[in-house]
Image (tube, helix red, strand yellow):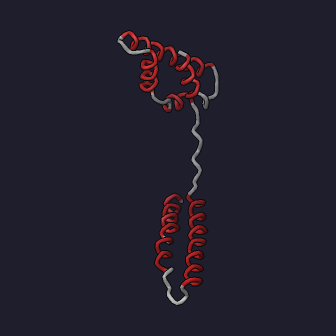
Amino acid sequence: MKKLKNHIDELFKDIPSNNETVMVKQEIIQNLEEKVFYLMEHGKEEEDAINKAIVEFGDIEELKKELGVKQPAKKNMARLNLEFSIWGSGLIIAFFVFINLYYTPNTIWAIYPIFAILWWPLSMYFVWSRKK
């Protein structure tokens, strides 16, 4: 049943260790072991029973909330994405203008891909404005 203990230890790695969490971990491991023995009594192989018990257990997000573990705040990346899209599209547009002027100065074809490229910063602007 070392696999069960390792799985539970992996789930609890972000939770600070105290008496309450140790007791909860022991209770979960005991419940999972009972589930494995039950499945083995009903014809499952040990490895299959362990895997099924782990899958049926699921994740511990609700348990983390009960234990008072704070989730890390998500950083708002909308402004950085907007800045990156502006600089990136500017460089791509400059590249198309250079290629257009260098190889075919009498035909202005670069405007077509430029319109397509401008959708990138425009979409990032709308994402940024929604998150403000």
Q: Residue at x 52, y 17 (%)?
A: 29
Extreme right residue here?
17
- Quarter of the image where the C terminus is located: bottom right
**In the figure, 76 relative to 111: above or below?**
above
Q: x%, y% of residue 23?
A: 57, 17
Q: x%, y% of residue 27?
A: 52, 16
Q: Nearer the viewer, residue 8 or 125?
A: 8
Q: Residue at x 52, y 67 (%)?
A: 121
**In the figure, 40 relative to 9: above or below?**
above
Q: How many marks?
A: 0
Q: Residue at x 46, y 18 (%)?
A: 47
Q: Nearer the viewer, residue 36 or 110?
A: 110
Q: Residue at x 60, y 71 (%)?
A: 91
Q: Quadrant of residue 85?
A: bottom right
Q: x%, y% of residue 92?
A: 57, 71
Q: Quadrant of residue 12?
A: top right
Q: Quadrant of residue 37?
A: top left
**In the figure, 68 relative to 131: above or below?**
above
Q: x%, y% of residue 113?
A: 48, 75
Is 119 left or right of 10, judged from the image as shown? left
Extreme bottom residue here?
106
**In the figure, 81 relative to 46: above or below?**
below
Extreme front residue here?
103
Q: Nearer the viewer, residue 108 or 52?
A: 108
Extreme left residue here?
42
